[in-house]
Image (tube, coloured by chain):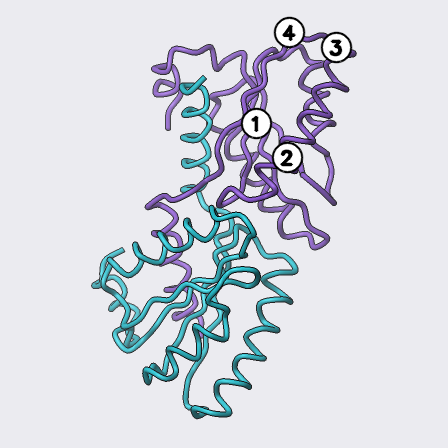
Chain colours: A purple, B cyan
Amino acid sequence: MSKEEYRAVGKSEEDMAVVLIGHGSKLPYGKGVMEEFGRRVEMRGIFKGVRVAFMQLNSPSIEEALRELAEEGIKNIVVQPVFLADGTHTTEDIPEKLKEAFEGVWAEIGKDVKLTYAKPIGVDERIVDILLDRVKEAMEGE
Amino acid sequence: MSKEEYRAVGKSEEDMAVVLIGHGSKLPYGKGVMEEFGRRVEMRGIFKGVRVAFMQLNSPSIEEALRELAEEGIKNIVVQPVFLADGTHTTEDIPEKLKEAFEGVWAEIGKDVKLTYAKPIGVDERIVDILLDRVKEAMEGE
């Protein structure tokens, strides 16, 4: 998706930041994958800020990432859960942490920041394509 | 990916089955998403069998899915973890369940079934595209 397609929405995404939220893991793989997603979203050059944050175990936490953006004066933040499907993490745990962060960060820095909570990845034909690629790679790699 | 591209690998994917393994959840969303991925992989018409199974909480279990395929006489099974990144689930929990299932199912049905364990989704530009779509939808949906 290009910057132009984003513009077609008619919102001011250039003053906007995106926070990609990962699950968090004691193993290093998840953090590495999330940071690479963050770099790639950043490279698209669509948003004023891109942050990666973790629900648990890894840093930065959700509150840390939101605080940083708020301190930079970002007024419009979309929080994108990088999860395949809704579950207790996306419907309970992350919203709860967002609420805490919102109350914590915003009580200090001001309440004029708008937070939008996006949907997880969900059913998408591109996931089917990726899964078929992984199956093929496993067959080739034997 | 077409059936022809699969054929280019030079393996007999028409005698092959794929088991898509999901995390499992007490909420219904994850199961629904996984079942839809299963239907869509099946619709590509590449494999002899496509099954969805869950690491925990939902059914069928990994052992149940493998048993069914083994009973149908499938000799070549690729197990595809439907996870964004490697973590303890993909490196410890699922392999352990595969080992248990393998010992359980194969002791009964015969040891001439070949199991290949594929990699999770991982870093992929198509995931970046999907995330940007979800962010855009959240902006539009406000």
Q: Residue A109 carries which label?
A: 3
- Marks 4 and 3 sit apart, C-alpha to C-alpha, by 9 Å
Residue holding disc 1: A79
Q: How far apart are marks 4 and 2 (CA)?
A: 21 Å
Task: Name the secondary structure under disc 1.
Answer: strand
The quarter of the displayed image where residue A101 is located: top right
CA–CA distance between discs 4 and 1?
A: 16 Å
Secondary structure of residue under mark 3: helix
Which residue appears at 27% of the width and 65% of the height?
A: B6
Residue A114 is situated, as x and y percent measured from the top left of the image, at 59, 13
Q: Do labels 4 and 1 share a chain?
A: yes
Secondary structure of the residue carrying tag 2 is helix
Q: Do the residues labelled 4 and 2 touch (CB within 8 Å)?
A: no
Q: Distance between the residues labelled 1 and 3?
A: 18 Å
Q: Can you tell which mark lies on residue B83? A: none
Q: What residue type is labelled 2?
A: Ile
Q: Mark 4 points at which residue?
A: A112
Q: Mark 2 points at which residue?
A: A94
Residue at point 67%, 45% (across, down): A24
